[in-house]
């Protein structure tokens, strides 16, 4: 009977240890994925800000809206918004 109790207790401890290990692995995977996603979003936001900055400079130089749209990849509506927010 002691042997059965010992084995049952060991099995329970092993089960709990496996669950804790899996949870830690899941958390680590989530952190890594979060970092990757955050970096990706940061790059996208930085590229968008750079396009807007270039468009503003071109607007100051009185470059045609169509040309600004081609150079920056912004739509004419987006460029018009920049004009409104001057």
Image (cartoon, grey):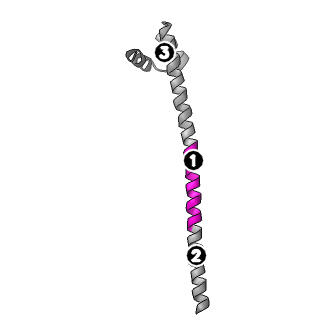
Tell me which label, 3 or 2, sits earlier in the chain.
2
Q: Is residue 34 magenta?
A: yes
- Relative height, residue 29 to residue 83 (above, below): below
| Residue located at (61% from left, 84% from top) | 7
- The tag on residue 33 is 1
Residue pointed to by mark 3: 56
- Relative height, residue 83 to residue 28 (above, below): above
- Relative height, residue 48 to residue 19 (above, below): above
Tell me which label, 1 or 3, sits earlier in the chain.
1
Q: Mark 3 to mark 2: distance in Å?
A: 64 Å
The x, y position of residue 52, in whole percent, is 49, 21
Tell me which label, 2 or 1, sits earlier in the chain.
2
- The main secondary structure of the magenta stretch is helix
Q: Which residues are magenta?
A: 19-35
Q: Mark 1 to mark 3: distance in Å?
A: 35 Å
Residue pointed to by mark 2: 13
- Relative height, residue 19 to residue 62 (above, below): below
Disc 3: CA contacts within 10 A as few (<14), some (14-19) or many (>=20)? some
């Amino acid at each position: 009977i002691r042997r059965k109790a010992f084995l049952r207790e060991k099995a329970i401890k092993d089960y709990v240890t496996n669950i804790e290990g899996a949870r830690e692995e899941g958390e680590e995977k989530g952190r890594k994925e979060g970092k990757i996603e955050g970096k990706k979003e940061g790059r996208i936001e930085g590229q968008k800000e750079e396009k807007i900055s270039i468009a503003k400079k071109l607007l100051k130089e009185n470059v045609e809206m169509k040309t600004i749209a081609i150079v920056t990849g912004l739509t004419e509506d987006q460029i018009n918004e920049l004009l409104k927010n001057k």
